[in-house]
Image (tube, rainbow, N blue to C red):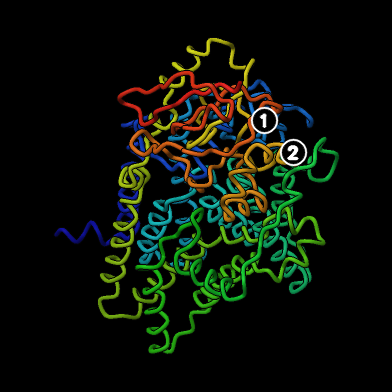
Amino acid sequence: MWSKPFNNSSILNKGFILLALFVIAAYVAPYYLLGEDTHIRVHDNMDSNIVWYKLLAESGQILTLPGATLPNVINGLPRSALPSGLDGMVWMYVLFEPMTAYAIGQTLMRLAAFIGMYLLLKNHFIRSEKSHLIAIGAALGFALLPYWPSGMLSIAGLPLALHCFLSLRKDGKSASVFYWITLAVIPFFSNFVLSFVFFLAIMGLIWLIDWIRQKRSNWAFFSAIAMMTVIYLIKNYLLITSMFFDSGFTSHRNALDLGHNSFERSIELTFENFLYGHTHDMAEQYLIILPVIGFAFALAAYRNLKPYWLLGLFSFNFLLSLWYAFWYWEGWRIVKDNVMVANTFNFARIHFFDPAIWYICFALALAIIWKHLRFGKIIAIVLLVVQCYHLFPINEENKYSEFNTPTFKEFYAEPLFNDIKNYIGDDPSTYRVVSIGMHPTIAQYNGFYTLDTYNNSFPLEYKKAFRDVIAGELEKNASLERYFDTWGGRLYMYVAEHGENYLFTKDRNDPLEQLDINTDALKELGGDYILSAVPIENNDELGLAFEQEFEQADLPWEIFLYRVE
Protein backbone atom coordinates (compact mmCIF):
# COMPACT_ATOMS: atom_id res chain seq x y z
CA MET A 1 0.00 0.00 0.00
CA TRP A 2 2.75 2.44 0.95
CA SER A 3 4.72 1.72 -2.23
CA LYS A 4 2.02 2.93 -4.63
CA PRO A 5 2.60 6.67 -4.17
CA PHE A 6 6.28 6.17 -4.95
CA ASN A 7 5.77 4.30 -8.20
CA ASN A 8 5.64 7.69 -9.89
CA SER A 9 9.27 8.78 -10.23
CA SER A 10 8.26 12.37 -10.97
CA ILE A 11 6.46 12.75 -7.64
CA LEU A 12 9.37 11.12 -5.81
CA ASN A 13 11.90 13.43 -7.49
CA LYS A 14 9.88 16.52 -6.56
CA GLY A 15 9.92 15.36 -2.95
CA PHE A 16 13.69 14.97 -3.00
CA ILE A 17 14.09 18.39 -4.60
CA LEU A 18 12.12 19.92 -1.73
CA LEU A 19 14.28 18.00 0.73
CA ALA A 20 17.44 19.31 -0.97
CA LEU A 21 16.14 22.88 -0.79
CA PHE A 22 15.42 22.37 2.91
CA VAL A 23 19.02 21.20 3.45
CA ILE A 24 20.32 24.29 1.64
CA ALA A 25 18.07 26.48 3.80
CA ALA A 26 19.50 24.84 6.92
CA TYR A 27 23.02 25.33 5.54
CA VAL A 28 22.61 29.10 5.16
CA ALA A 29 20.43 29.54 8.27
CA PRO A 30 23.33 30.67 10.56
CA TYR A 31 23.76 33.84 8.48
CA TYR A 32 20.17 34.85 9.22
CA LEU A 33 19.89 33.52 12.78
CA LEU A 34 23.25 34.78 14.06
CA GLY A 35 23.70 37.84 11.87
CA GLU A 36 26.98 39.61 12.67
CA ASP A 37 27.75 36.96 15.28
CA THR A 38 28.41 34.48 12.45
CA HIS A 39 31.90 33.12 11.90
CA ILE A 40 32.89 33.60 8.25
CA ARG A 41 36.02 33.31 6.17
CA VAL A 42 38.76 35.91 6.71
CA HIS A 43 41.15 35.17 3.83
CA ASP A 44 40.13 36.95 0.62
CA ASN A 45 36.82 37.81 2.23
CA MET A 46 36.68 39.87 5.46
CA ASP A 47 40.24 41.03 4.79
CA SER A 48 39.30 42.39 1.37
CA ASN A 49 36.17 41.94 -0.73
CA ILE A 50 33.56 42.76 1.90
CA VAL A 51 35.30 46.05 2.64
CA TRP A 52 35.77 46.81 -1.05
CA TYR A 53 32.01 46.50 -1.57
CA LYS A 54 31.29 48.62 1.51
CA LEU A 55 33.76 51.36 0.58
CA LEU A 56 32.37 51.53 -2.93
CA ALA A 57 28.76 51.56 -1.74
CA GLU A 58 29.53 54.52 0.53
CA SER A 59 31.85 56.37 -1.85
CA GLY A 60 29.40 58.07 -4.17
CA GLN A 61 31.57 56.77 -7.03
CA ILE A 62 29.77 53.57 -7.94
CA LEU A 63 29.22 54.67 -11.53
CA THR A 64 32.13 56.83 -12.53
CA LEU A 65 34.57 57.50 -15.33
CA PRO A 66 38.13 56.12 -15.52
CA GLY A 67 40.65 58.21 -13.65
CA ALA A 68 38.61 58.66 -10.48
CA THR A 69 40.14 57.72 -7.13
CA LEU A 70 38.91 56.90 -3.65
CA PRO A 71 40.71 59.07 -1.07
CA ASN A 72 40.10 56.61 1.79
CA VAL A 73 42.89 54.29 0.66
CA ILE A 74 46.60 54.96 -0.13
CA ASN A 75 45.92 58.68 -0.65
CA GLY A 76 43.82 57.87 -3.70
CA LEU A 77 43.07 54.30 -4.76
CA PRO A 78 42.27 54.12 -8.50
CA ARG A 79 38.58 53.44 -8.96
CA SER A 80 39.41 50.66 -11.44
CA ALA A 81 40.92 48.63 -8.57
CA LEU A 82 37.44 48.05 -7.12
CA PRO A 83 34.45 46.11 -8.49
CA SER A 84 32.44 47.50 -11.37
CA GLY A 85 29.47 49.71 -10.66
CA LEU A 86 27.45 47.20 -12.69
CA ASP A 87 28.32 44.38 -10.29
CA GLY A 88 25.16 43.07 -8.64
CA MET A 89 26.87 42.58 -5.27
CA VAL A 90 27.83 46.25 -5.12
CA TRP A 91 24.17 47.17 -5.21
CA MET A 92 23.40 44.55 -2.57
CA TYR A 93 25.74 46.47 -0.28
CA VAL A 94 24.01 49.71 -1.22
CA LEU A 95 20.59 48.30 -0.33
CA PHE A 96 21.52 46.29 2.77
CA GLU A 97 23.92 46.25 5.69
CA PRO A 98 27.13 44.32 4.85
CA MET A 99 26.26 41.14 6.76
CA THR A 100 22.75 41.06 5.30
CA ALA A 101 24.11 41.54 1.79
CA TYR A 102 26.63 38.77 2.46
CA ALA A 103 23.91 36.37 3.64
CA ILE A 104 21.74 37.05 0.59
CA GLY A 105 24.74 36.55 -1.69
CA GLN A 106 25.52 33.20 -0.07
CA THR A 107 21.91 32.08 -0.51
CA LEU A 108 21.70 33.11 -4.17
CA MET A 109 25.02 31.43 -4.91
CA ARG A 110 23.93 28.07 -3.48
CA LEU A 111 20.49 28.13 -5.05
CA ALA A 112 22.05 28.85 -8.45
CA ALA A 113 24.58 26.05 -7.90
CA PHE A 114 21.85 23.53 -7.06
CA ILE A 115 19.44 24.52 -9.82
CA GLY A 116 22.18 24.76 -12.45
CA MET A 117 23.84 21.43 -11.66
CA TYR A 118 20.46 19.65 -11.41
CA LEU A 119 19.29 20.97 -14.80
CA LEU A 120 22.65 20.23 -16.41
CA LEU A 121 22.76 16.63 -15.19
CA LYS A 122 19.07 15.91 -15.78
CA ASN A 123 18.97 17.28 -19.31
CA HIS A 124 22.42 16.49 -20.66
CA PHE A 125 24.11 13.70 -18.70
CA ILE A 126 21.57 11.59 -16.78
CA ARG A 127 18.40 11.62 -18.83
CA SER A 128 16.59 8.61 -17.35
CA GLU A 129 13.89 9.88 -15.00
CA LYS A 130 14.46 6.90 -12.72
CA SER A 131 18.05 8.09 -12.21
CA HIS A 132 17.20 11.73 -11.53
CA LEU A 133 17.79 11.13 -7.83
CA ILE A 134 21.50 11.06 -8.72
CA ALA A 135 21.17 14.47 -10.36
CA ILE A 136 19.40 15.86 -7.27
CA GLY A 137 21.96 14.43 -4.84
CA ALA A 138 25.01 15.51 -6.86
CA ALA A 139 23.50 18.98 -7.31
CA LEU A 140 22.94 19.25 -3.56
CA GLY A 141 26.55 18.30 -2.91
CA PHE A 142 27.68 20.92 -5.42
CA ALA A 143 25.52 23.54 -3.65
CA LEU A 144 27.07 22.75 -0.26
CA LEU A 145 30.69 23.28 -1.31
CA PRO A 146 32.85 25.74 0.66
CA TYR A 147 32.91 28.28 -2.16
CA TRP A 148 35.04 31.38 -2.12
CA PRO A 149 32.26 33.77 -1.02
CA SER A 150 33.07 36.70 -3.29
CA GLY A 151 33.21 34.48 -6.35
CA MET A 152 29.40 34.39 -6.37
CA LEU A 153 28.43 32.70 -9.66
CA SER A 154 31.98 32.63 -11.02
CA ILE A 155 32.19 28.96 -9.98
CA ALA A 156 28.75 28.11 -8.63
CA GLY A 157 27.04 29.45 -11.79
CA LEU A 158 29.08 27.52 -14.35
CA PRO A 159 26.70 24.51 -14.57
CA LEU A 160 23.71 26.83 -15.02
CA ALA A 161 25.46 28.71 -17.82
CA LEU A 162 26.56 25.45 -19.46
CA HIS A 163 23.00 24.08 -19.33
CA CYS A 164 21.72 27.22 -21.04
CA PHE A 165 24.36 27.12 -23.76
CA LEU A 166 23.92 23.40 -24.45
CA SER A 167 20.17 23.89 -24.67
CA LEU A 168 20.60 26.79 -27.09
CA ARG A 169 23.05 24.71 -29.10
CA LYS A 170 20.51 21.91 -29.33
CA ASP A 171 17.27 23.85 -29.85
CA GLY A 172 18.56 26.92 -31.67
CA LYS A 173 15.97 29.61 -32.31
CA SER A 174 13.23 27.53 -30.68
CA ALA A 175 15.02 27.51 -27.30
CA SER A 176 13.22 28.98 -24.31
CA VAL A 177 13.65 32.67 -23.54
CA PHE A 178 14.61 31.51 -20.03
CA TYR A 179 18.08 30.64 -21.34
CA TRP A 180 18.62 34.08 -22.82
CA ILE A 181 17.50 35.84 -19.65
CA THR A 182 19.69 33.64 -17.47
CA LEU A 183 22.78 34.21 -19.61
CA ALA A 184 22.11 37.95 -19.52
CA VAL A 185 21.85 38.01 -15.71
CA ILE A 186 24.81 35.79 -14.78
CA PRO A 187 27.48 38.37 -15.78
CA PHE A 188 26.21 40.81 -13.16
CA PHE A 189 26.87 38.25 -10.39
CA SER A 190 30.11 36.70 -11.61
CA ASN A 191 33.67 37.62 -12.49
CA PHE A 192 34.76 37.62 -16.13
CA VAL A 193 38.52 37.32 -15.57
CA LEU A 194 38.24 34.58 -12.94
CA SER A 195 36.35 31.97 -14.93
CA PHE A 196 33.96 33.14 -17.61
CA VAL A 197 36.62 34.40 -19.99
CA PHE A 198 37.77 30.77 -20.24
CA PHE A 199 34.21 29.43 -20.29
CA LEU A 200 33.15 31.68 -23.17
CA ALA A 201 36.33 30.84 -25.06
CA ILE A 202 35.43 27.14 -24.81
CA MET A 203 31.84 27.84 -25.91
CA GLY A 204 33.24 29.72 -28.89
CA LEU A 205 35.51 26.81 -29.72
CA ILE A 206 32.53 24.40 -29.58
CA TRP A 207 30.57 26.68 -31.93
CA LEU A 208 33.52 26.81 -34.35
CA ILE A 209 33.94 23.03 -34.34
CA ASP A 210 30.21 22.57 -34.97
CA TRP A 211 30.39 25.03 -37.85
CA ILE A 212 33.32 23.23 -39.45
CA ARG A 213 31.92 19.72 -38.97
CA GLN A 214 28.28 20.37 -39.82
CA LYS A 215 28.86 22.99 -42.52
CA ARG A 216 26.16 25.19 -40.98
CA SER A 217 26.14 27.92 -38.41
CA ASN A 218 24.02 27.87 -35.27
CA TRP A 219 23.42 31.59 -34.98
CA ALA A 220 21.35 31.31 -31.80
CA PHE A 221 24.26 29.61 -30.06
CA PHE A 222 26.74 32.12 -31.48
CA SER A 223 24.52 35.07 -30.55
CA ALA A 224 24.28 33.86 -26.96
CA ILE A 225 28.08 33.69 -26.73
CA ALA A 226 28.40 37.16 -28.24
CA MET A 227 25.67 38.60 -26.00
CA MET A 228 27.25 37.32 -22.80
CA THR A 229 30.70 38.50 -23.87
CA VAL A 230 29.43 41.99 -24.69
CA ILE A 231 27.64 42.23 -21.34
CA TYR A 232 30.84 41.30 -19.53
CA LEU A 233 32.81 43.89 -21.49
CA ILE A 234 30.27 46.59 -20.69
CA LYS A 235 30.15 45.61 -17.04
CA ASN A 236 33.98 45.69 -16.81
CA TYR A 237 34.43 48.97 -18.65
CA LEU A 238 36.83 50.29 -16.00
CA LEU A 239 39.02 47.19 -16.17
CA ILE A 240 38.99 47.13 -19.97
CA THR A 241 39.87 50.81 -20.13
CA SER A 242 42.74 50.45 -17.67
CA MET A 243 44.12 47.40 -19.51
CA PHE A 244 43.97 48.59 -23.09
CA PHE A 245 43.90 52.37 -22.85
CA ASP A 246 45.51 55.02 -20.67
CA SER A 247 44.75 54.05 -17.08
CA GLY A 248 46.44 57.12 -15.64
CA PHE A 249 48.87 55.00 -13.60
CA THR A 250 51.25 52.07 -13.92
CA SER A 251 49.83 49.16 -11.96
CA HIS A 252 51.94 47.18 -9.51
CA ARG A 253 50.86 44.12 -11.54
CA ASN A 254 53.30 45.19 -14.25
CA ALA A 255 56.11 44.28 -11.86
CA LEU A 256 54.77 40.86 -10.84
CA ASP A 257 57.44 38.19 -10.73
CA LEU A 258 55.46 35.03 -9.98
CA GLY A 259 56.27 31.51 -11.04
CA HIS A 260 59.63 30.18 -9.93
CA ASN A 261 58.66 26.64 -8.93
CA SER A 262 61.00 23.82 -9.86
CA PHE A 263 59.84 21.02 -12.16
CA GLU A 264 59.62 18.65 -9.18
CA ARG A 265 57.53 21.13 -7.18
CA SER A 266 55.23 21.62 -10.18
CA ILE A 267 54.61 17.87 -10.35
CA GLU A 268 53.80 17.84 -6.62
CA LEU A 269 51.45 20.80 -7.03
CA THR A 270 49.67 19.02 -9.89
CA PHE A 271 48.71 16.12 -7.66
CA GLU A 272 47.96 18.37 -4.68
CA ASN A 273 45.45 20.32 -6.71
CA PHE A 274 44.02 17.22 -8.36
CA LEU A 275 43.47 15.47 -5.03
CA TYR A 276 42.56 18.37 -2.75
CA GLY A 277 41.78 21.39 -4.91
CA HIS A 278 42.62 25.05 -4.39
CA THR A 279 41.46 27.18 -1.45
CA HIS A 280 39.18 29.15 -3.79
CA ASP A 281 37.57 26.16 -5.54
CA MET A 282 37.54 23.22 -3.14
CA ALA A 283 35.36 20.31 -4.32
CA GLU A 284 36.06 17.99 -1.36
CA GLN A 285 36.66 15.16 -3.82
CA TYR A 286 39.41 13.22 -2.07
CA LEU A 287 37.54 11.07 0.48
CA ILE A 288 34.50 9.90 -1.46
CA ILE A 289 34.29 11.18 -5.03
CA LEU A 290 37.69 9.95 -6.24
CA PRO A 291 37.26 6.41 -4.85
CA VAL A 292 33.74 6.25 -6.33
CA ILE A 293 35.06 7.27 -9.74
CA GLY A 294 37.85 4.71 -9.47
CA PHE A 295 35.35 1.98 -8.59
CA ALA A 296 33.10 3.04 -11.48
CA PHE A 297 36.02 2.67 -13.91
CA ALA A 298 36.72 -0.82 -12.57
CA LEU A 299 33.03 -1.76 -12.81
CA ALA A 300 32.85 -0.38 -16.36
CA ALA A 301 35.85 -2.47 -17.36
CA TYR A 302 34.29 -5.57 -15.77
CA ARG A 303 30.96 -4.96 -17.54
CA ASN A 304 32.70 -4.08 -20.82
CA LEU A 305 31.26 -0.54 -20.75
CA LYS A 306 32.78 2.50 -22.43
CA PRO A 307 32.24 5.54 -20.15
CA TYR A 308 33.62 8.09 -22.60
CA TRP A 309 32.19 11.15 -20.85
CA LEU A 310 33.44 10.06 -17.44
CA LEU A 311 36.90 9.27 -18.76
CA GLY A 312 37.07 12.47 -20.81
CA LEU A 313 35.99 14.80 -17.99
CA PHE A 314 38.16 13.02 -15.42
CA SER A 315 41.18 13.38 -17.72
CA PHE A 316 40.31 17.00 -18.43
CA ASN A 317 40.33 17.77 -14.70
CA PHE A 318 43.77 16.23 -14.39
CA LEU A 319 44.98 18.38 -17.29
CA LEU A 320 43.55 21.46 -15.56
CA SER A 321 45.57 20.62 -12.45
CA LEU A 322 48.66 20.09 -14.60
CA TRP A 323 48.14 23.45 -16.32
CA TYR A 324 47.51 25.22 -13.01
CA ALA A 325 50.66 23.80 -11.43
CA PHE A 326 52.95 24.41 -14.37
CA TRP A 327 51.76 27.99 -14.80
CA TYR A 328 54.02 28.67 -11.80
CA TRP A 329 56.92 26.64 -13.19
CA GLU A 330 60.16 28.53 -13.64
CA GLY A 331 60.29 27.43 -17.27
CA TRP A 332 57.46 29.85 -18.05
CA ARG A 333 59.50 32.85 -16.94
CA ILE A 334 60.91 33.41 -20.43
CA VAL A 335 57.36 33.94 -21.68
CA LYS A 336 56.20 36.01 -18.70
CA ASP A 337 59.27 38.23 -18.87
CA ASN A 338 58.67 39.04 -22.53
CA VAL A 339 54.87 39.01 -22.91
CA MET A 340 53.16 41.46 -20.58
CA VAL A 341 49.74 39.82 -20.60
CA ALA A 342 51.30 36.49 -19.56
CA ASN A 343 52.79 38.23 -16.52
CA THR A 344 49.79 40.31 -15.45
CA PHE A 345 46.93 37.91 -16.27
CA ASN A 346 46.62 34.59 -14.44
CA PHE A 347 45.84 31.99 -17.10
CA ALA A 348 45.93 29.28 -14.42
CA ARG A 349 42.52 30.39 -13.19
CA ILE A 350 40.84 27.99 -15.56
CA HIS A 351 41.20 25.56 -12.64
CA PHE A 352 38.00 27.18 -11.28
CA PHE A 353 36.21 24.68 -13.56
CA ASP A 354 37.32 21.86 -11.24
CA PRO A 355 34.34 21.67 -8.83
CA ALA A 356 31.67 21.53 -11.54
CA ILE A 357 33.58 18.84 -13.43
CA TRP A 358 34.12 16.78 -10.28
CA TYR A 359 30.39 16.67 -9.53
CA ILE A 360 29.50 15.80 -13.11
CA CYS A 361 32.02 12.95 -12.87
CA PHE A 362 30.56 11.94 -9.49
CA ALA A 363 27.08 11.75 -10.99
CA LEU A 364 28.29 9.78 -14.04
CA ALA A 365 30.15 7.31 -11.80
CA LEU A 366 27.07 6.84 -9.61
CA ALA A 367 24.95 6.25 -12.70
CA ILE A 368 27.23 3.34 -13.66
CA ILE A 369 26.93 1.90 -10.16
CA TRP A 370 23.15 2.50 -10.18
CA LYS A 371 22.61 0.59 -13.43
CA HIS A 372 25.28 -2.11 -13.45
CA LEU A 373 25.80 -3.27 -9.87
CA ARG A 374 23.61 -5.43 -7.69
CA PHE A 375 21.99 -3.20 -5.07
CA GLY A 376 23.51 -0.35 -7.07
CA LYS A 377 20.57 1.98 -6.44
CA ILE A 378 20.94 1.66 -2.68
CA ILE A 379 24.72 2.03 -2.85
CA ALA A 380 24.46 5.14 -5.04
CA ILE A 381 21.94 6.75 -2.68
CA VAL A 382 24.10 5.96 0.35
CA LEU A 383 27.16 7.49 -1.33
CA LEU A 384 25.24 10.66 -2.15
CA VAL A 385 24.05 10.94 1.44
CA VAL A 386 27.56 10.33 2.77
CA GLN A 387 29.07 13.03 0.53
CA CYS A 388 26.41 15.58 1.51
CA TYR A 389 26.81 14.59 5.18
CA HIS A 390 30.54 15.24 4.78
CA LEU A 391 29.93 18.66 3.22
CA PHE A 392 27.25 20.06 5.52
CA PRO A 393 29.51 20.63 8.57
CA ILE A 394 31.95 22.62 6.41
CA ASN A 395 29.58 25.60 6.42
CA GLU A 396 31.35 28.76 7.50
CA GLU A 397 29.87 28.96 10.99
CA ASN A 398 31.01 25.44 11.90
CA LYS A 399 34.34 25.57 10.13
CA TYR A 400 35.60 28.93 11.34
CA SER A 401 34.25 28.65 14.87
CA GLU A 402 36.39 25.52 15.19
CA PHE A 403 39.38 27.50 13.93
CA ASN A 404 38.60 30.06 16.65
CA THR A 405 38.61 32.99 14.23
CA PRO A 406 36.61 36.12 15.10
CA THR A 407 32.99 36.52 14.11
CA PHE A 408 32.01 39.24 11.66
CA LYS A 409 31.15 41.56 14.58
CA GLU A 410 34.35 40.75 16.47
CA PHE A 411 36.58 41.11 13.43
CA TYR A 412 35.48 44.62 12.50
CA ALA A 413 34.93 45.64 16.16
CA GLU A 414 33.06 48.86 15.36
CA PRO A 415 32.53 50.03 19.00
CA LEU A 416 36.26 49.70 19.72
CA PHE A 417 37.34 51.64 16.64
CA ASN A 418 34.72 54.28 17.33
CA ASP A 419 36.44 54.79 20.68
CA ILE A 420 39.73 55.34 18.87
CA LYS A 421 38.18 57.82 16.44
CA ASN A 422 36.56 59.69 19.31
CA TYR A 423 39.87 59.82 21.18
CA ILE A 424 41.71 61.27 18.16
CA GLY A 425 38.87 63.71 17.75
CA ASP A 426 39.62 64.92 14.22
CA ASP A 427 37.71 64.10 11.06
CA PRO A 428 39.23 60.82 9.74
CA SER A 429 39.79 62.45 6.36
CA THR A 430 42.35 64.81 7.94
CA TYR A 431 44.81 62.12 9.07
CA ARG A 432 46.16 58.80 7.83
CA VAL A 433 46.73 55.53 9.70
CA VAL A 434 48.48 52.21 9.19
CA SER A 435 47.90 48.93 11.05
CA ILE A 436 50.32 46.44 12.61
CA GLY A 437 49.28 42.91 13.55
CA MET A 438 45.89 43.10 11.84
CA HIS A 439 44.40 43.60 8.42
CA PRO A 440 44.16 47.26 7.30
CA THR A 441 40.65 46.61 5.99
CA ILE A 442 39.46 46.62 9.62
CA ALA A 443 40.42 50.28 9.89
CA GLN A 444 38.97 50.94 6.42
CA TYR A 445 35.67 49.31 7.38
CA ASN A 446 35.49 51.65 10.37
CA GLY A 447 35.98 54.82 8.34
CA PHE A 448 39.71 55.43 8.80
CA TYR A 449 41.80 56.65 5.86
CA THR A 450 44.63 54.13 5.48
CA LEU A 451 48.03 54.15 3.82
CA ASP A 452 48.13 50.36 3.83
CA THR A 453 45.71 48.12 1.96
CA TYR A 454 45.00 44.91 0.11
CA ASN A 455 43.86 45.36 -3.49
CA ASN A 456 44.25 43.72 -6.88
CA SER A 457 45.80 46.78 -8.48
CA PHE A 458 47.32 50.06 -7.36
CA PRO A 459 50.10 52.37 -8.57
CA LEU A 460 53.52 50.75 -8.74
CA GLU A 461 55.04 54.07 -7.69
CA TYR A 462 53.10 53.95 -4.42
CA LYS A 463 54.22 50.38 -3.76
CA LYS A 464 57.85 51.48 -4.07
CA ALA A 465 57.29 54.40 -1.70
CA PHE A 466 55.52 52.17 0.80
CA ARG A 467 58.34 49.64 0.63
CA ASP A 468 60.69 52.27 2.05
CA VAL A 469 58.60 52.25 5.21
CA ILE A 470 58.93 48.51 5.86
CA ALA A 471 62.32 47.82 4.20
CA GLY A 472 64.03 47.19 7.55
CA GLU A 473 61.58 44.45 8.47
CA LEU A 474 61.65 42.87 5.01
CA GLU A 475 65.43 42.59 5.20
CA LYS A 476 65.08 40.43 8.31
CA ASN A 477 62.79 37.88 6.61
CA ALA A 478 63.78 36.67 3.13
CA SER A 479 60.49 34.84 2.58
CA LEU A 480 58.47 37.93 3.45
CA GLU A 481 60.66 40.11 1.27
CA ARG A 482 60.19 37.76 -1.70
CA TYR A 483 56.43 37.66 -1.07
CA PHE A 484 56.18 41.45 -1.09
CA ASP A 485 58.52 42.08 -4.01
CA THR A 486 57.26 39.37 -6.38
CA TRP A 487 53.54 39.89 -5.72
CA GLY A 488 52.84 42.68 -3.23
CA GLY A 489 49.06 42.82 -3.44
CA ARG A 490 49.09 43.24 0.32
CA LEU A 491 50.59 46.62 1.17
CA TYR A 492 50.92 45.73 4.86
CA MET A 493 53.09 47.00 7.68
CA TYR A 494 54.98 43.73 7.67
CA VAL A 495 56.84 42.56 10.75
CA ALA A 496 59.58 39.98 10.23
CA GLU A 497 58.72 37.87 13.28
CA HIS A 498 54.99 37.92 12.41
CA GLY A 499 55.51 36.73 8.85
CA GLU A 500 52.21 36.44 6.98
CA ASN A 501 50.12 36.35 10.16
CA TYR A 502 47.75 39.24 10.61
CA LEU A 503 45.45 38.22 13.49
CA PHE A 504 47.16 39.23 16.72
CA THR A 505 44.31 39.35 19.19
CA LYS A 506 44.65 40.30 22.87
CA ASP A 507 45.34 36.70 23.87
CA ARG A 508 48.22 36.58 21.37
CA ASN A 509 49.99 39.93 21.40
CA ASP A 510 53.58 39.55 22.56
CA PRO A 511 55.36 42.92 22.32
CA LEU A 512 57.70 43.85 19.49
CA GLU A 513 61.10 44.46 21.05
CA GLN A 514 62.80 45.84 17.94
CA LEU A 515 60.55 47.11 15.18
CA ASP A 516 62.59 48.36 12.22
CA ILE A 517 60.44 50.72 10.19
CA ASN A 518 61.24 54.06 8.58
CA THR A 519 58.96 56.56 10.27
CA ASP A 520 60.36 59.39 8.15
CA ALA A 521 59.18 57.56 5.01
CA LEU A 522 55.85 56.92 6.72
CA LYS A 523 55.53 60.61 7.52
CA GLU A 524 56.32 61.52 3.89
CA LEU A 525 53.35 59.38 2.81
CA GLY A 526 51.20 61.32 5.25
CA GLY A 527 51.18 58.81 8.11
CA ASP A 528 49.94 60.23 11.41
CA TYR A 529 48.99 57.22 13.53
CA ILE A 530 49.80 53.53 13.90
CA LEU A 531 47.05 51.17 15.10
CA SER A 532 49.01 48.26 16.51
CA ALA A 533 47.55 45.00 17.82
CA VAL A 534 50.80 44.46 19.77
CA PRO A 535 52.89 46.78 21.96
CA ILE A 536 55.96 48.37 20.32
CA GLU A 537 58.73 48.55 22.93
CA ASN A 538 61.17 50.67 20.91
CA ASN A 539 58.55 53.25 20.00
CA ASP A 540 60.55 56.16 21.44
CA GLU A 541 63.61 55.56 19.27
CA LEU A 542 61.32 55.24 16.24
CA GLY A 543 59.72 58.59 16.97
CA LEU A 544 56.36 57.08 17.90
CA ALA A 545 54.52 58.61 20.81
CA PHE A 546 52.32 56.14 22.68
CA GLU A 547 48.86 57.63 23.05
CA GLN A 548 46.54 55.10 24.64
CA GLU A 549 45.52 51.45 24.80
CA PHE A 550 42.00 50.50 23.70
CA GLU A 551 40.04 47.31 24.37
CA GLN A 552 36.55 46.07 25.15
CA ALA A 553 35.73 42.90 27.03
CA ASP A 554 33.59 41.31 24.30
CA LEU A 555 35.96 42.11 21.40
CA PRO A 556 39.20 40.27 20.55
CA TRP A 557 41.48 43.23 19.86
CA GLU A 558 43.71 45.24 22.14
CA ILE A 559 44.78 48.26 20.12
CA PHE A 560 47.82 50.34 20.99
CA LEU A 561 47.61 53.79 19.41
CA TYR A 562 50.88 55.48 18.45
CA ARG A 563 51.27 58.95 16.98
CA VAL A 564 54.02 59.58 14.42
CA GLU A 565 55.98 62.53 15.75
225 or 247, nearer to the observer: 247
Disc 1 vs disc 2: Cβ atoms closer than 8 Å? yes
View extreme (left): residue: 1
Q: Position of residue 355 (x, y in %)?
A: 49, 60
115 or 261, nearer to the observer: 261
Q: Is residue 292 above or below residue 60?
A: below
Local SS, label 1: loop
424 or 449, nearer to the observer: 424
Mark 2, residues whose alpha carbon is within 10 Å: few (<14), some, or many (≥20)? some
Residue 377 placement: quadrant: bottom left
Give me the residue at 62% from left, 18% from top: 431
Q: Position of residue 273 (x, y in %)?
A: 51, 66
Check disc 1 and report the residue beneath it.
74
Give me the residue at 35% from left, 68% from top: 288
Q: Amino acid at mark 1?
A: Ile
Q: Amino acid at mark 2?
A: Pro
Mark on residue 494? none
Check disc 2 and report the residue beneath it.
459
Instruction: Mark yes or no: residue 241 visible.
Output: no
Q: Position of residue 174 (x, y in %)?
A: 64, 53
Give me the residue at 37% from left, 41% from top: 405
Total marks placed: 2
Give how far apart the Cα atoms at labels 1 and 2 are: 9 Å
Mark 1, residues whose alpha carbon is within 10 Å: few (<14), some, or many (≥20)? many
42 or 5, nearer to the observer: 42
Q: Is residue 550 above or below residue 272?
A: above
Q: Position of residue 206 (x, y in %)?
A: 69, 66
